[in-house]
Image: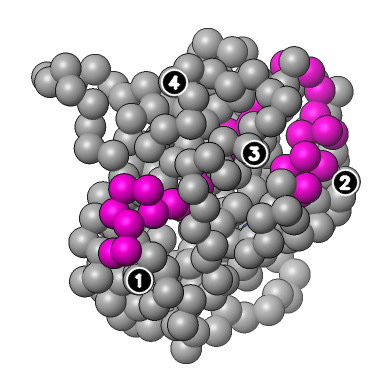
Amino acid sequence: MAEDAMAPVEPRPVPDPTVSHSARIWNYWLGGKDNYAVDRDAGDKVAAMLPIIVAQARADRAFLGRAIRHLVSQEGIRQFLDIGTGLPTADNTHEVAQREAPESRIVYVDNDPLVLVHARALLTSTPEGSCAYVEGDLHDPDKILAEAARALDLAQPVALMLLGVLHHIPDTDEAYSIVRRLVAALAPGSFLTINHSTSAISGEAMEEAVRHWNRVGTPSMTLRSPEQIDRFFDGLDLLPPGVVSCSQWRPEPGLSSELPAAVDEFCGVARKV
Ligand SMILES: C[S@@+](CC[C@H](N)C(=O)[O-])C[C@H]1O[C@@H](n2cnc3c(N)ncnc32)[C@H](O)[C@@H]1O
């Protein structure tokens, strides 16, 4: 159920510290502290196979910041539905959005109990805006929409954020159908933002790291090609530069005129017309 961050805490399932989990490994790679030894161990093994993974996780987080700043300041978005939130770390969705527009309203959705515990404690809103948390599974988009509607006005534009989560849906047709269902419920002028793992850049090294992940970690990961990632945006108005490596999506101007090195997370931002 949708909960305000300050709502009373009910008993919840306890996270299992003996099984590594993507949210906590991700938190470890991002430099966070909300992870167990089993997550650090799994994270180190993947990083030994694919050293670029830590830079990749950080490029993903930096993309989140640039995309949200664009959506708030250039597109006037004030409502966010962030599914697959991950453990709170630096520059979470509401922090970036509310820095630009303090009245922004955010609904965070995740299916991991540890994420829920931390989100309730840490994802606190500005007084002008709101932060709610839904324990929900992307496999059940209708439930997510019903809960999100308690905190967001779905008749007004919403930015749907699916960052690092669609690759946890193994069946590609189901993943497309989930995204279609979620987007169909949003008002014109809404946005879809996706970031998804691929092996287009590192090839076999990324594929081997994911095979290892799928032996030891949960939930499983399914890599998709940039073309398959592009199809999530069918019927929507994809903003330039289209579907690209997340490090190369509108990078901050730097000292060099060259694009940052590509990583195996491809992203896009599109408008529902
Ligand atoms: C790799 S983290 C991404 C975190 C954040 N979105 C980011 O990009 O930095 C993936 C998150 O998706 C969550 N997740 C995985 N499968 C999910 C599902 N079926 N429904 C909801 N959340 C899911 C995990 O618990 C985890 O918090």
| Label 3: element kind | loop
Mark 2 highlights which residue?
146
Point out the stretch of residues depicted in magenta: 177-205
Residue type indicated by callout 4: Pro
- Identify the residue at image location x=21%, y=71%: 48
Mark 3 vs 2, N-terminal side: 2
Q: Is residue 180 magenta?
A: yes
**Badge 1: how crowded within 10 Å, few (<14), some, or many (20+)?**
some
| Residue situated furthest left in the rendering | 255
Residue 81, quarter of the rendered image: top right
Q: Are marks 3 and 2 in contact (CB under 8 Å)?
A: no
Give the Cα separation between the discs numbered 4 and 1.
29 Å
From the top left corner, tell me how far across and down residue 45 is, in percent: 28, 76
Residue 52, magenta (yes or no): no
Q: Which residue is mark 3?
A: 232
For residue 231, the mark is none
- Residue 241: give its label: 4
Compare marks 3 and 4 and give the one earlier in the sequence.
3
Is residue 43 placed above or below 156 in the rendered structure? below
Q: CA distance from mark 3 to mark 2?
A: 22 Å
